[in-house]
Image (cartoon, rainbow, N blue to C red):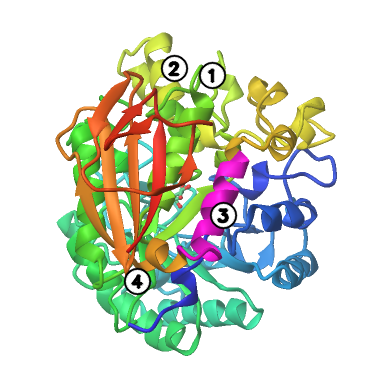
């Protein structure tokens, strides 16, 4: 395949509500992002994935869109958006918009019309089924708790919502509706954006009557159609979110003939601390051997057949240093370890805001301090099931989405420099020590570690092997150590690290030379052996 710009890019995800407020209303906004572009340029990223900023009642923080052609006033105006695209462009940064087309807001004019009933021209844009207020069409569940069906008095029918009842599902069987979506996508691309992150794209081919939600039979037909109508004429990055992706269908999504998407954002590794068949809130342990197996599987299977996206964090999952690392004594070492493992792999790395300074999960005592619709719904649901407050809170602390959504920590002044007003969600109080300014000033900070990884990938002589090199795992059955080798055109890279706190001395399986990056200031590599201190991770470069 011809090389693509997005294969060599590093993406930074911004959750606009929590990034930078510029007008004191306590909510991050577009002017705030513009103000921080120089920081992102300093970090070295190429692309910003912007979580939704469209007009929305904000039932799910913007993932419930009421107008695809307008910006929500709390985020700014269309002029601000144009300015952001332009200012980012000056710094060679592209803006990738979040495309939420599995559902709209219940306040979208299409839904307002549709619910008038069968004779309305928009009725069929949504998924309606017969029933009575007492009898649901079937047992489909919403991801945010409860039934996926909501009774609509006005229509005298049920509508489908795989998320909250404020997010009715669109009916992708409807050709006219699909054309409206393609028109809107083209409109945004004409504005100069660099592509789309596609929200829960694997659900657009659902067949509710057969209880098929993800990976429906027509899913790839719709994506191919979208490609023909919109994407094939543009040189853009497209990334489809899929919690149900397998390496098999990922090869289809990101196939080399370019007939679908650039890559898929899949969660097989992220789901590993949840037991199969159990709910998100029932906590499980991470199986480290399995984690290595899954990461390596995706690396090997997609090599030369598709393209991986690489991530540990986003706005829906807890912070990785708290989740699978140590966010106390070894916070810095852990954050750097996760970064090295990820950026050393083949694929496009994604950094979620705050990850680059090692931001951690948060623990509020009261449920009233939380804002996330999923967390609030589930709190009620589990309370009704008899769970105690403490038990539910343990799950919220471990898995709740607000862990990732606390405001960005810029400095140690009031509200961490995020807002002059009252923040929409409380800050993590560790902002007094964990913040951007401290990371900029410290030569050994987590931020500098990320900068170095990005520089290696984008500009160094290791670029080719880091981006395109093949992948071979080592220490697959070791309880603490994970290592892999990358190779291309006479150059190699070797990553080896200790995932735990126990010190380990192991024999190096290959002969290594230069240490390109480490999360300790010195190293213990001697006579073919390496001693790895807690979470110590080394990245070697090799030239033949
Ligand atoms: C996935 C998004 O990332 C999440 O934040 C949202 O709640 C659901 N899709 C519904 O749009």
- The x, y position of residue 318, in whole percent, is 45, 34
Mark 2 or 3: in front is 3
Q: Is mark 3 within 8 Å of ligand 1?
A: no
Sequence-first disc among 3 and 4: 3
Q: Would residue 452 be counted in the magenta stretch?
A: yes
The tag on residue 382 is none
* Residue 371 at least partly seen: yes
The tag on residue 172 is 4
**Residue that carries the numbered disc 2 in the rendered image:** 393
Sequence-first disc among 1 and 2: 1
- Segment colored magenta: 447-462
* Left-right relation of 78 to 296: right
- The x, y position of residue 147, in whole percent, is 31, 41
**Residue that carries the numbered disc 3 in the rendered image:** 12
Label 2: state its secondary structure: helix
Sequence-first disc among 2 and 4: 4
């Amino acid at each position: 395949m011809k090389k693509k710009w997005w294969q060599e890019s590093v993406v930074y995800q911004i959750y606009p509500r929590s990034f930078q407020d510029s007008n004191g209303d306590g909510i991050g906004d577009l002017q705030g992002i513009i103000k921080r572009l120089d920081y992102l340029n300093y970090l070295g990223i190429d692309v910003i994935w912007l979580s939704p900023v469209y007009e929305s009642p904000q039932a799910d923080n913007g993932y419930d869109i009421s107008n695809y052609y307008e910006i929500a006033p709390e985020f700014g105006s269309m002029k601000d958006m144009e300015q952001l695209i332009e200012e980012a462009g000056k710094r060679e940064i592209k803006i990738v918009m979040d495309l939420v087309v599995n559902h709209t807001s219940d306040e979208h004019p299409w839904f307002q019309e549709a619910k008038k009933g069968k004779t309305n021209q928009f009725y069929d844009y949504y998924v309606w089924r017969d029933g009575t207020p007492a009898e649901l069409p079937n047992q489909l569940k919403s991801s945010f708790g409860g039934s996926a069906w909501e009774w609509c008095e006005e229509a005298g029918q049920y509508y489908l919502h795989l998320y909250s009842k404020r997010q009715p599902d669109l009916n992708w069987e409807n050709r006219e509706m699909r054309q409206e979506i393609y028109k809107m996508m083209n409109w945004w691309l004409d504005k100069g954006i660099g592509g789309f992150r596609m929200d829960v794209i694997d659900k657009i081919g659902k067949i509710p009557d057969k209880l098929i939600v993800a990976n429906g039979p027509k899913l790839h037909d719709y994506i191919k159609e979208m490609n023909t109508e919109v994407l094939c004429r543009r040189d853009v990055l497209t990334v489809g979110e899929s919690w149900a992706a397998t390496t098999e269908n990922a090869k289809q999504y990101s196939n080399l003939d370019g007939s679908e998407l650039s890559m898929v954002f899949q969660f097989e590794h992220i789901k590993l601390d949840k037991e199969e068949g159990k709910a998100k809130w029932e906590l499980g342990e991470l199986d480290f051997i399995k984690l290595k197996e899954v990461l390596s599987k995706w690396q090997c299977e997609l090599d030369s057949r598709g393209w991986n996206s690489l991530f540990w964090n986003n706005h829906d999952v807890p912070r990785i240093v708290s989740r699978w690392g140590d966010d106390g004594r070894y916070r810095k070492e852990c954050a750097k370890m996760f970064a090295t493992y990820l950026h050393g792999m083949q694929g496009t790395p994604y950094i979620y805001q705050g990850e680059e300074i090692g931001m951690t999960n948060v623990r509020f005592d009261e449920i009233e301090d939380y804002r996330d619709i999923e967390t609030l719904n589930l709190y009620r649901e589990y309370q009704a099931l008899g769970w105690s407050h403490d038990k539910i809170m343990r799950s919220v602390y471990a898995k709740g989405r607000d862990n990732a959504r606390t405001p960005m920590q810029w400095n140690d002044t009031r509200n961490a420099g995020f807002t002059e007003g009252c923040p929409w969600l409380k800050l993590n109080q560790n902002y007094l020590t964990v913040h951007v300014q401290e990371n900029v000033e410290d030569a050994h900070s987590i931020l500098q570690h990320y900068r170095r990884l990005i520089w290696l990938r984008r500009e160094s002589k290791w670029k080719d092997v880091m981006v395109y090199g093949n992948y071979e795992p080592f220490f697959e059955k070791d309880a603490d150590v994970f290592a892999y080798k990358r190779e291309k055109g006479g150059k190699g890279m070797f990553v080896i690290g200790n995932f735990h706190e126990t010190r380990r001395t192991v024999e190096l399986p290959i002969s290594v030379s230069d240490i390109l990056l480490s999360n300790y200031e010195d190293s213990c590599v001697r006579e073919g052996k390496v001693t790895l201190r807690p979470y110590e991770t080394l990245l070697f470069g090799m030239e033949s």
